[in-house]
Amino acid sequence: MSSIALKTLFLKEVRRFSKVWLQTVLSPLVTTSLYFLVFGVALGSRLREISGVPYIQFVVPGLVMMTMVRDAFLNTSSSLFQSKINGTITDILVAPIGAFEMLIAYVGAAMLRAFIVGCLVYIVALSFTFFSLHHLGWTLFFSVFVTATLALLGMVAALWAQKFDHLAIFPNFVLLPLAFLGGVFYSIDLLPEPWHTVSLFNPLLYMVNGLRFGFLGVADVSPEASAGVVLASFLVLLGVTGTLLRSGYSLRS
Protein backbone atom coordinates (compact mmCIF):
# COMPACT_ATOMS: atom_id res chain seq x y z
CA MET A 1 0.00 0.00 0.00
CA SER A 2 1.34 3.44 -0.97
CA SER A 3 0.92 5.79 1.98
CA ILE A 4 1.88 8.80 -0.17
CA ALA A 5 -0.78 8.01 -2.77
CA LEU A 6 -3.36 7.38 -0.06
CA LYS A 7 -2.58 10.66 1.72
CA THR A 8 -2.60 12.63 -1.54
CA LEU A 9 -5.97 11.32 -2.69
CA PHE A 10 -7.48 11.74 0.77
CA LEU A 11 -6.33 15.38 1.00
CA LYS A 12 -7.60 16.00 -2.53
CA GLU A 13 -11.04 14.74 -1.52
CA VAL A 14 -11.04 16.81 1.68
CA ARG A 15 -10.07 19.95 -0.24
CA ARG A 16 -12.80 19.23 -2.77
CA PHE A 17 -15.64 19.47 -0.24
CA SER A 18 -13.88 22.16 1.80
CA LYS A 19 -13.76 24.58 -1.13
CA VAL A 20 -17.56 24.45 -1.49
CA TRP A 21 -18.33 24.42 2.23
CA LEU A 22 -21.48 26.49 1.75
CA GLN A 23 -22.95 23.58 -0.21
CA THR A 24 -21.36 20.63 1.55
CA VAL A 25 -21.40 21.78 5.19
CA LEU A 26 -23.62 24.80 5.72
CA SER A 27 -26.51 23.75 3.48
CA PRO A 28 -27.25 20.39 5.21
CA LEU A 29 -26.73 22.08 8.60
CA VAL A 30 -29.38 24.71 7.82
CA THR A 31 -31.79 22.12 6.38
CA THR A 32 -31.48 19.79 9.38
CA SER A 33 -31.78 22.71 11.79
CA LEU A 34 -35.12 23.61 10.16
CA TYR A 35 -36.28 20.00 10.64
CA PHE A 36 -35.29 20.30 14.27
CA LEU A 37 -37.17 23.57 14.73
CA VAL A 38 -40.34 22.22 13.11
CA PHE A 39 -40.42 18.70 14.52
CA GLY A 40 -38.41 19.07 17.71
CA VAL A 41 -39.45 22.47 18.99
CA ALA A 42 -42.92 22.96 17.51
CA LEU A 43 -44.23 19.39 17.87
CA GLY A 44 -42.24 18.79 21.04
CA SER A 45 -44.48 21.22 22.92
CA ARG A 46 -47.45 18.96 22.14
CA LEU A 47 -46.08 15.40 22.05
CA ARG A 48 -44.11 15.85 25.26
CA GLU A 49 -42.43 12.42 25.61
CA ILE A 50 -41.65 9.32 23.56
CA SER A 51 -40.05 6.25 25.15
CA GLY A 52 -39.71 8.18 28.38
CA VAL A 53 -37.60 11.06 27.01
CA PRO A 54 -38.70 14.54 25.91
CA TYR A 55 -39.66 14.56 22.24
CA ILE A 56 -37.26 17.40 21.46
CA GLN A 57 -34.41 15.15 22.64
CA PHE A 58 -35.87 12.08 20.95
CA VAL A 59 -35.49 13.55 17.45
CA VAL A 60 -31.90 14.76 17.87
CA PRO A 61 -30.13 11.42 17.23
CA GLY A 62 -32.36 10.72 14.24
CA LEU A 63 -31.60 14.09 12.65
CA VAL A 64 -27.87 13.71 13.31
CA MET A 65 -27.88 10.25 11.74
CA MET A 66 -30.00 11.34 8.78
CA THR A 67 -27.54 14.14 8.07
CA MET A 68 -24.47 11.91 8.34
CA VAL A 69 -26.06 9.23 6.13
CA ARG A 70 -26.86 11.77 3.44
CA ASP A 71 -23.50 13.53 3.48
CA ALA A 72 -21.41 10.34 3.54
CA PHE A 73 -23.30 9.02 0.53
CA LEU A 74 -23.23 12.27 -1.43
CA ASN A 75 -19.52 12.88 -0.89
CA THR A 76 -18.31 9.64 -2.47
CA SER A 77 -21.04 9.35 -5.08
CA SER A 78 -20.69 12.90 -6.42
CA SER A 79 -16.89 12.93 -6.37
CA LEU A 80 -16.37 9.58 -8.07
CA PHE A 81 -19.16 10.11 -10.59
CA GLN A 82 -17.91 13.56 -11.58
CA SER A 83 -14.43 12.12 -12.05
CA LYS A 84 -15.93 9.52 -14.39
CA ILE A 85 -17.92 12.06 -16.38
CA ASN A 86 -15.10 14.61 -16.61
CA GLY A 87 -12.48 12.01 -17.45
CA THR A 88 -10.26 13.03 -14.53
CA ILE A 89 -10.50 9.50 -13.13
CA THR A 90 -7.79 8.66 -15.66
CA ASP A 91 -5.29 10.63 -13.58
CA ILE A 92 -5.99 8.33 -10.64
CA LEU A 93 -5.96 5.14 -12.71
CA VAL A 94 -2.52 5.85 -14.22
CA ALA A 95 -1.08 6.85 -10.84
CA PRO A 96 0.64 4.28 -8.60
CA ILE A 97 -2.42 3.82 -6.41
CA GLY A 98 -4.37 0.62 -5.91
CA ALA A 99 -8.01 -0.12 -5.30
CA PHE A 100 -7.46 -0.40 -1.55
CA GLU A 101 -5.92 3.07 -1.31
CA MET A 102 -8.72 4.53 -3.46
CA LEU A 103 -11.35 2.97 -1.24
CA ILE A 104 -9.81 4.22 2.01
CA ALA A 105 -9.22 7.75 0.66
CA TYR A 106 -12.74 8.21 -0.71
CA VAL A 107 -14.44 6.64 2.30
CA GLY A 108 -12.22 8.46 4.81
CA ALA A 109 -12.94 11.87 3.30
CA ALA A 110 -16.69 11.14 3.21
CA MET A 111 -16.63 10.09 6.86
CA LEU A 112 -14.80 13.28 7.81
CA ARG A 113 -17.41 15.43 6.08
CA ALA A 114 -20.24 13.45 7.71
CA PHE A 115 -18.63 13.80 11.16
CA ILE A 116 -18.20 17.56 10.76
CA VAL A 117 -21.80 18.14 9.75
CA GLY A 118 -23.12 15.68 12.34
CA CYS A 119 -21.20 17.41 15.14
CA LEU A 120 -22.48 20.81 14.01
CA VAL A 121 -26.07 19.55 14.02
CA TYR A 122 -25.53 18.15 17.52
CA ILE A 123 -24.13 21.49 18.71
CA VAL A 124 -27.13 23.33 17.27
CA ALA A 125 -29.45 20.87 19.04
CA LEU A 126 -27.68 21.49 22.35
CA SER A 127 -28.61 25.15 22.08
CA PHE A 128 -32.27 24.08 22.38
CA THR A 129 -32.02 21.10 24.71
CA PHE A 130 -29.07 19.79 26.71
CA PHE A 131 -28.40 16.16 27.52
CA SER A 132 -25.26 14.13 28.14
CA LEU A 133 -24.33 11.15 25.98
CA HIS A 134 -25.60 7.92 27.49
CA HIS A 135 -22.91 5.66 25.98
CA LEU A 136 -19.92 7.10 24.13
CA GLY A 137 -18.79 3.71 22.84
CA TRP A 138 -22.04 2.93 21.01
CA THR A 139 -22.20 6.49 19.72
CA LEU A 140 -18.74 6.23 18.15
CA PHE A 141 -19.39 2.71 16.85
CA PHE A 142 -22.52 3.65 14.94
CA SER A 143 -21.09 6.96 13.76
CA VAL A 144 -18.03 5.26 12.28
CA PHE A 145 -19.59 2.18 10.71
CA VAL A 146 -22.76 3.84 9.43
CA THR A 147 -20.88 6.65 7.68
CA ALA A 148 -18.39 4.14 6.26
CA THR A 149 -21.26 1.97 5.00
CA LEU A 150 -23.03 4.85 3.28
CA ALA A 151 -19.76 6.08 1.79
CA LEU A 152 -19.26 2.62 0.29
CA LEU A 153 -22.81 2.66 -1.04
CA GLY A 154 -22.07 6.03 -2.63
CA MET A 155 -19.09 4.54 -4.47
CA VAL A 156 -21.19 1.63 -5.72
CA ALA A 157 -23.86 4.06 -6.92
CA ALA A 158 -21.27 6.21 -8.70
CA LEU A 159 -19.76 3.19 -10.46
CA TRP A 160 -23.19 1.95 -11.54
CA ALA A 161 -24.64 5.29 -12.66
CA GLN A 162 -24.28 6.34 -16.28
CA LYS A 163 -25.90 9.77 -15.94
CA PHE A 164 -26.92 12.20 -13.21
CA ASP A 165 -30.52 10.94 -13.22
CA HIS A 166 -29.29 7.50 -12.18
CA LEU A 167 -27.30 8.95 -9.30
CA ALA A 168 -30.24 11.01 -8.05
CA ILE A 169 -32.33 7.87 -7.59
CA PHE A 170 -30.50 6.87 -4.40
CA PRO A 171 -30.76 10.02 -2.22
CA ASN A 172 -34.21 11.05 -3.44
CA PHE A 173 -36.04 7.73 -3.80
CA VAL A 174 -34.13 5.39 -1.49
CA LEU A 175 -32.27 7.10 1.36
CA LEU A 176 -34.70 9.91 2.14
CA PRO A 177 -37.85 7.72 2.29
CA LEU A 178 -36.03 5.04 4.30
CA ALA A 179 -34.77 7.71 6.72
CA PHE A 180 -38.25 9.18 7.26
CA LEU A 181 -39.67 5.67 7.72
CA GLY A 182 -36.77 4.61 9.93
CA GLY A 183 -37.96 6.18 13.15
CA VAL A 184 -36.23 9.55 12.86
CA PHE A 185 -39.30 11.43 14.12
CA TYR A 186 -41.24 8.66 15.87
CA SER A 187 -40.99 5.33 17.63
CA ILE A 188 -42.06 2.30 15.61
CA ASP A 189 -43.76 1.04 18.77
CA LEU A 190 -46.48 3.57 17.92
CA LEU A 191 -47.17 1.83 14.59
CA PRO A 192 -49.93 -0.77 14.24
CA GLU A 193 -49.36 -4.10 12.56
CA PRO A 194 -48.33 -4.91 9.89
CA TRP A 195 -46.38 -1.63 9.63
CA HIS A 196 -44.43 -2.29 12.80
CA THR A 197 -43.14 -5.56 11.36
CA VAL A 198 -42.50 -4.02 7.95
CA SER A 199 -40.39 -1.31 9.57
CA LEU A 200 -38.05 -3.95 10.97
CA PHE A 201 -36.84 -4.65 7.42
CA ASN A 202 -35.65 -1.07 7.01
CA PRO A 203 -31.84 -0.98 7.55
CA LEU A 204 -31.89 2.72 8.41
CA LEU A 205 -34.13 1.92 11.38
CA TYR A 206 -31.20 0.10 12.99
CA MET A 207 -28.78 2.90 12.18
CA VAL A 208 -31.03 5.56 13.69
CA ASN A 209 -31.89 3.51 16.76
CA GLY A 210 -28.28 2.52 17.31
CA LEU A 211 -27.23 6.15 17.53
CA ARG A 212 -30.32 6.97 19.61
CA PHE A 213 -29.28 4.38 22.16
CA GLY A 214 -25.79 5.87 22.28
CA PHE A 215 -27.24 9.34 22.78
CA LEU A 216 -30.20 8.69 25.06
CA GLY A 217 -30.13 5.05 26.17
CA VAL A 218 -33.50 4.27 24.56
CA ALA A 219 -34.22 2.48 21.29
CA ASP A 220 -36.89 0.45 19.53
CA VAL A 221 -34.40 -2.36 18.92
CA SER A 222 -31.42 -3.49 20.98
CA PRO A 223 -28.02 -1.95 20.20
CA GLU A 224 -26.63 -5.45 19.63
CA ALA A 225 -29.20 -6.14 16.90
CA SER A 226 -28.55 -2.73 15.35
CA ALA A 227 -24.80 -3.33 15.44
CA GLY A 228 -25.26 -6.69 13.71
CA VAL A 229 -27.26 -5.16 10.86
CA VAL A 230 -24.79 -2.29 10.44
CA LEU A 231 -21.75 -4.59 10.46
CA ALA A 232 -23.35 -6.99 7.97
CA SER A 233 -24.22 -4.09 5.65
CA PHE A 234 -20.69 -2.69 5.96
CA LEU A 235 -19.00 -6.01 5.16
CA VAL A 236 -21.25 -6.72 2.16
CA LEU A 237 -20.70 -3.26 0.66
CA LEU A 238 -16.97 -3.41 1.43
CA GLY A 239 -16.71 -6.63 -0.56
CA VAL A 240 -18.81 -5.32 -3.44
CA THR A 241 -16.95 -2.00 -3.66
CA GLY A 242 -13.54 -3.62 -3.43
CA THR A 243 -14.43 -6.09 -6.17
CA LEU A 244 -15.73 -3.36 -8.48
CA LEU A 245 -12.66 -1.17 -7.96
CA ARG A 246 -10.20 -4.02 -8.53
CA SER A 247 -11.98 -5.00 -11.74
CA GLY A 248 -12.09 -1.39 -12.96
CA TYR A 249 -15.83 -1.66 -13.51
CA SER A 250 -17.15 1.42 -15.30
CA LEU A 251 -13.81 3.19 -14.79
CA ARG A 252 -11.82 2.07 -17.79
CA SER A 253 -14.62 2.31 -20.37
Image (cartoon, rainbow, N blue to C red):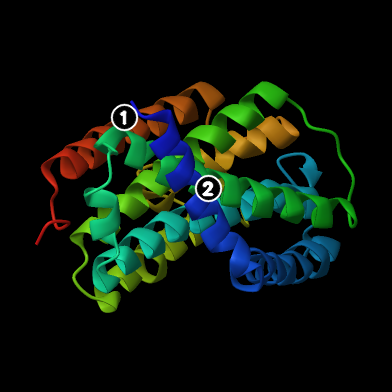
x and y percent of residue 53 in the render? 79, 42
Q: Residue at x 58, y 50 (%)?
A: 114
Residue 85 is left or right of residue 128, and the answer is: left
Quadrant of image for the C terminus: bottom left
Q: Amino acid at mark 1?
A: Leu
Pointer 2 residue: 11
Q: Nearer the viewer, residue 207 or 89?
A: 89
Quadrant of image for the N terminus: top left
Indicate the secondary structure of the residue bearing disc 2. helix
Query: How packed is label 2: few (under 14 Cα within 10 Å), some, or many (20 or more)?
Result: some
> In the rendered image, is residue 182 in sight?
no
x and y percent of residue 171 in the render? 40, 65
Q: Earlier in the sequence, mark 2 or mark 1?
A: 2
Q: Residue at x 18, y 70 (%)?
A: 162
Indicate the secondary structure of the residue bearing disc 1. helix
Query: How packed is label 1: few (under 14 Cα within 10 Å), some, or many (20 or more)?
Result: some
Q: Amino acid at mark 2?
A: Leu
Q: Nearer the viewer, residue 112 or 228?
A: 112
Q: Nearer the viewer, residue 188 or 62?
A: 62
Q: Residue at x 34, y 49 (%)?
A: 153
Circle count: 2
x and y percent of residue 9 in the render? 43, 46
Pointer 1 residue: 235
> In the rendered image, is residue 25 in sight?
yes
Q: Residue at x 78, y 69 (%)?
A: 37
Residue 127 is left or right of residue 221, and the answer is: right
Does 85 appear above or below 213?
Answer: below
